[in-house]
Amino acid sequence: MRKLLLAALLLFAAPVDATVTQIIGTLTSNSGPINGQLCLSLPVNGVDTSTNRALSAQQTCFPMTNGTLPVFANVVPNDVIQPANTYYIVRAFDRAGFGRYSANWVIPTGGGTFDMGLAAPTTITTTNITYLQPGILNASQVWTAPQTMPINVVSSLPTTTFGVARTSVAGSVVLLAANSCGDIVTVTVNGATTSMYASASGSITNGLTTYAWVSSASTVSVEYCNETTGGITPAAATLQVVVIQ
């Protein structure tokens, strides 16, 4: 089990009788299928009416390989969430931390799956919710009534990096068995919080996938995973770690 996925599992893991929808399909950018992370969040806190449990608006990310997500990429569908007419704010990042996709999705119960490759961006028309971030600020939106959208830009990262912090860390060189992940190495990134996106890149041994996440305040964890059918010993490498607010 990849340790970086614990936060996602804790936020979206549901009881046996909960209603969930699996995100399937392939997401591509202009340069092809995306490799990195897909992050989703609700615009406001809500309630899953299928279980009467609270839902956080905190962002949750799933690893994305060749444009696809793992089988446990399940979310609570919007049609069982109160308040009504919510949606998911969706962002996809490549392994270097650059944004490759952004949209608003309404994910229904449907047949239990949601094909993101066929998803059309959702126009937000609800009138019963005041959203703190009502839409995508860098894309066209259609509104059915006058909107007031105060914007506050807050950054806890150094202002000289414009919301991006970079550092480096030596990757693990321990033999990785087939379909396993190696030791986690950590690096300090001052100002990083668990709600921020992290990535690690560098000269990575063929067959390995690198995962990075903000595991605690000012700490980024990095891990190699071997998703092949044979053992691999990572070559010594210095990885560039990026944290984006």
Image (cartoon, helix red, strand yellow):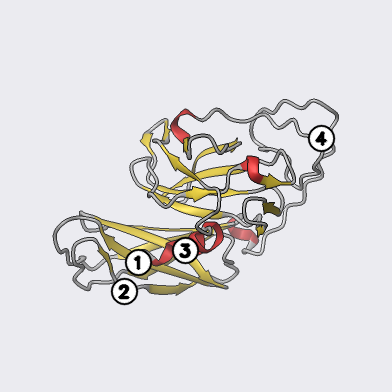
The secondary element bearing badge 2 is classed as loop
For marks 1 and 4, give the CA distance.
44 Å
On-image quarter of the C terminus: bottom right
Judge depth for marks 1 and 4 and give the one in front.
4
For marks 4 and 3, give the CA distance.
36 Å
Residue at (67% x, 46% y) in the render:
81
Q: Residues within 10 Å of mark 4 (few under 14, many from 20)?
A: few
The secondary element bearing badge 4 is classed as loop
Of labels 3 and 2, earlier in sequence is: 2
> In front here: 47 or 100?
47
For marks 2 and 4, give the CA distance.
49 Å
Residue, disc 1: 223
Residue, disc 3: 213
On-image quarter of the N terminus: bottom left
Total marks shown come to: 4
Residue 179 percent location from the top left of the image: 23, 60
Marks 2 & 1, CB-CB < 8 Å contact: yes
Q: Indicate the amino acid at tag 3.
A: Trp
Of labels 2 and 1, earlier in sequence is: 2
Residue 142 percent location from the top left of the image: 72, 25
- Residue 101 in view in this figure: yes
Residue, disc 4: 127
Of labels 3 and 1, earlier in sequence is: 3
Residue, disc 2: 183
The secondary element bearing badge 1 is classed as strand
Q: Indicate the amino acid at tag 4.
A: Thr
